[in-house]
Image (cartoon, rainbow, N blue to C red):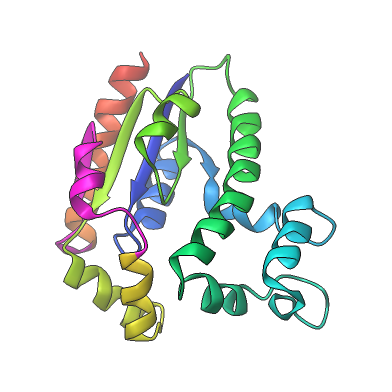
Amino acid sequence: MLAVGLTGGIGAGKSTVAQLLVRRGAVLVDADAIARQVVEPGRPALAALVERFGAAILGPDGTLDRAALAAVAFADPGALADLNAITHPAIATEMAEQRRAVENTDAVVLLDVPLLKPVHRDLLALDVVVVVDCAPDLALERLVTGRAMDRADARARMAAQPSREERLQGADLVIDNNDGRQALEAEVERVWAALTALAR
């Protein structure tokens, strides 16, 4: 098994790249999907969030109102740190379990982690880190036009993440996503060839 950390700033196109790599045969362990699972009703992380942020973060049906939580957490660095301290360990545990399930195969396993930090390289025993990169102005426009995000909210979320320089510093391979779908497909093909060679 080749364990590949896949990361990129919000709006860089990481999810699209993950889909393109899965189409080529990679196995995906998705931190965003797991992040949604660990805060489902009845899970310890949701109870801890309600204890820290109050019942106003819940919808009428008792599920997490992600927008309400984001409004509180992204407005204050201390609140964001508390949110991460509650959710990140639960996410890391589940990711490690999903990774273990394919441990003794020859798969290229993508661990899709939006906020990949140097500590994750050891924690998740990553062999390679792939960063999806694009210019911050382009990422911002994608968030505003593609995801219909408020510009100020998009800027706040971008500012809350590691900088572009930090991400690139930790990269073994970089996928450039500045030039449209055709160019991105070529970039993914190049990186997939490198990953399958490493896996062999």
| 60 displayed left or right of 9 | right
**Residue 178 found in image quarter:** bottom left
Q: Is residue 142 above or below residue 191?
A: below
Residue 161 location (% of width, % of height)? 35, 58
Counting every numbered tag in the picture gives: 0
Q: In this view, does 189 lie above or below 137?
A: above
Q: Which of 170 and 82 is in front in this view?
A: 82
Which residue corresponds to the image point at 25% horizontal and 68% vertical from the top-left?
A: 139
Q: Is residue 108 above or below residue 183?
A: above
Magenta residues span 160-180
Which residue corresponds to the image point at 61% horizontal and 54% vertical from the top-left?
A: 35
Which residue corresponds to the image point at 77% horizontal and 71% vertical from the top-left?
A: 63
Residue 130 location (% of width, % of height)? 30, 38
Q: Which of 119 and 125 is in front in this view?
A: 119
Is 10 magenta? The answer is: no
Is 165 magenta? The answer is: yes
Q: Nearer the viewer, residue 143 or 89?
A: 89
Residue 83 location (% of width, % of height)? 58, 59
**Residue 195 found in image quarter:** top left
Which residue corresponds to the image point at 14% horizontal and 62% vertical from the top-left?
A: 179
